[in-house]
Image: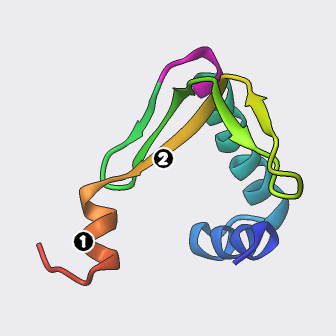
């Protein structure tokens, strides 16, 4: 499912226009990005949590030449699926 298909599904489920559904989805995504960028966590009970993490600097190798290269430290984005989501994917009943 891509973003357009998701917007169509939201519009149908919520009985709202596709334009409204698009604004809602984009607002949710923008707020998740803002909160995680600040270093906070967005927790949606039953669905999962979005948070940021850190990846330490390390030494890697250029696969073509084999020479060592330095890979800089970076911030990462993490998503941890919630129990309800995992149970649904694994078809477990509550």
Q: How many marks?
A: 2
Near mark 2 (Cα within 10 A), the count class, few <14, some 14-19 or many ≥20, is some
Residue 13 x/y as whole percent: 58, 73
Residue at 34% over, 65% down: 85
Q: Secondary structure at mark 1?
A: helix
Magenta stretch: includes residue 37: yes
Label 1 belongs to which residue? 87
- Callout 1: 10 Å neighbours few (<14), some, many (20+)? some
Q: Residue at x 75, y 76 (%)?
A: 5
Above or below, 1 against 29 in this view is below
Question: Residue farthest to the top?
Answer: 38
Measure the alpha-carbon separation of dots 2 and 1: 16 Å
Residue at 51%, 28% in the rendered image: 53
For the N terminus, the quadrant is: bottom right
Q: Nearer the viewer, residue 26 or 49?
A: 49
Looking at the rendering, the stretch of residues picked out in magenta corresponds to: 36-40
Q: In this picture, is 11 found above or below 58?
A: below
Q: In the rendered image, which quarter is residue 52 located in? A: top right
* Front of the two marks 2 and 1: 2
Q: Which residue is mark 2?
A: 79
Spot the residue most to the bottom. 91
Please report whichever mark, 2 or 1, sits nearer to the chain's N-terminal start. 2
Q: Of residues 58 and 49, which is closer to you in this image?
A: 58
């Amino acid at each position: 499912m891509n973003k357009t298909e998701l917007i169509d599904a939201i519009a149908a489920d919520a009985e709202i226009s596709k334009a409204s559904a698009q604004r809602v989805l984009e607002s949710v995504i923008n707020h998740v990005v803002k909160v995680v960028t600040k270093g906070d966590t967005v927790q949606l009970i039953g669905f999962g949590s979005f948070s940021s993490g850190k990846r330490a600097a390390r030494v890697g190798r250029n696969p073509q030449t084999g020479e060592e290269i330095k890979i800089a430290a970076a911030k990462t984005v993490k998503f941890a699926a919630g129990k309800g989501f995992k149970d649904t994917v694994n078809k477990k009943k509550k």
